[in-house]
Amino acid sequence: MNEVVITGVGCVSPFGIGRQALWDGLTQAHCAIARVPWLPGNCNAGALPEQALEGRFSANELLMFDRSTQFALLAGREALDMAALDMTTVDSHRCAVYMGTAVGGSDSLHSAYLDLYQAGSQTLAPWTVPRVMANAAASHLSLRHGFKGPAMTLSTACASSTQAIGEAYRLLRHGDADLVLAGGTDACLNALVWKAWEALRAMAPDTCRPFSAGRRGMVLGEGGGVLVMETLAHARARGARVLARVLGYGVNSDAVDLLKPSVDGPALAMRQAMASSGLAPESFTYINAHGTGTLLNDRCETAAIRQVFSAHADRLQVSSVKSAIGHLMGAAGVVELIGGLMATLQDRIPPTLNYQAADAECDLDYVIEGARPARVDAWLKNSFAFGGLNVSLALGRAVETEQ
């Protein structure tokens, strides 16, 4: 089995374009959740700054690219630049793209509905389908960079990008590819998606307060993230700097309830990830939590962590990046993972913001004081989704000889 590593990361988040904008915001304990004027009722969300995309794409490209695809292409370019990949030196047929999305081109779908039902248009733009289709981001990444291996799109709600990374890990581990662009993207801040989530009564009217007493629900956000993942042998052969190791992957379905979170499924996913890593539970010192800020999810995730780690749970550091950027839906896992990489690249754990008071059923160390200096050698990234879907990734620090 091949060892799998990360050699490049790129992202678009409510803090702006680029990984550094995300890391700076998390380091300084800033919250990017704010009023978004184009949403119904001028509601709070984690939105990309309004001018951030200006001049990034040509007029012809904008005809073809939904906002979510734009996020993916920007993140992919940054990740490849960081990885210093020269396509003339690799086998393009062994380079794959695995991307996740929860709602695909929802901005374009919303615009099409407005044209059809509000403006009374008798026809729609010929580029509607290419913009709306869920596989647009993966396909455009493949086209733009000449990746001729499989271009896969996974749609497993909030777990989409984390599962895409996990499946890319499997592909590389089993020797079916040398390099994979893996991640996810979603641009959900339109009235169509907003009203649908509002109808579920799962959204907070103010901000995201994971694991805190007084939390009132999730807050939507938008963004995208991409990792360059490679086999360790391939990365070494081309002299790439290794940022982190992907050590294990756990995935399962509760098969219990479509919407209600569970304890056993998330616990199993964490056990699966740690088992495939070969590390003992006590080796893990940080969990980058799913942490949505909803009443049940946070309690279930806490209970699952306690079930898995027993006494060691009290020594774990647990934080939710959603408290700073909102819930990026299909992109949540990868952007949060990129935030979590601070723990091994900068020896700082991203904080859980907006915490007010302890909840008796959420009784772990949630890093509420701000970004915390700490050395982390092994950690977990959790993502749990509607449909009863549970994903956990085990990640580790690059060894000194790889850096």
Image (spheres, grey):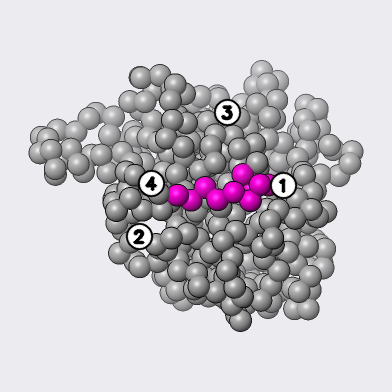
Q: Quadrant of residue 233?
A: top right
* Local SS, label 3: helix
For residue 248, above or below residue 100: below
Q: Nearer the viewer, mark 1 or mark 4?
A: 4
Q: Nearer the viewer, mark 3 or mark 4?
A: 4
- Characterize the local packing of mark 4: few (<14), some (14-19) or many (20 or more) Cα atoms within 10 angstroms: some
* Local SS, label 2: helix
Which residue is rendered at x = 72% and y = 47% of the image? 342
Q: Nearer the viewer, mark 4 or mark 2?
A: 4
Does residue 203 show up? yes
* Local SS, label 4: loop
The Cα–Cα distance between marks 1 and 4, rounded to whole angstroms, is 28 Å
- Disc 3 marks which residue? 77
The Cα–Cα distance between marks 4 and 2, rounded to whole angstroms, is 16 Å
x, y percent for residue 4:
73, 45
Task: Check residue 342 in the rendering and tell me which mark sits there, or answer none.
Answer: 1
Which range of residues does the magenta coloring cover? 25-34
- Disc 2 marks which residue? 197
Does residue 391 show up? no
The Cα–Cα distance between marks 3 and 1, rounded to whole angstroms, is 20 Å
x, y percent for residue 155:
45, 51
Tag 3 and tag 1, C-beta contact below 8 Å: no
Q: Amino acid at mark 1?
A: Met
Q: Residue furthest bottom?
A: 360
Among the two numbered marks 4 and 2 on one chain, the one whose residue lies closer to the N terminus: 4
Q: Is residue 10 left or right of residue 283?
A: left
- Characterize the local packing of mark 3: few (<14), some (14-19) or many (20 or more) Cα atoms within 10 angstroms: some
Q: Is residue 200 left or right of residue 370?
A: left
Which residue is rendered at x = 27% and y = 34% of the image? 128
Among the two numbered marks 2 and 3 on one chain, the one whose residue lies closer to the N terminus: 3
Q: Amino acid at mark 3?
A: Arg
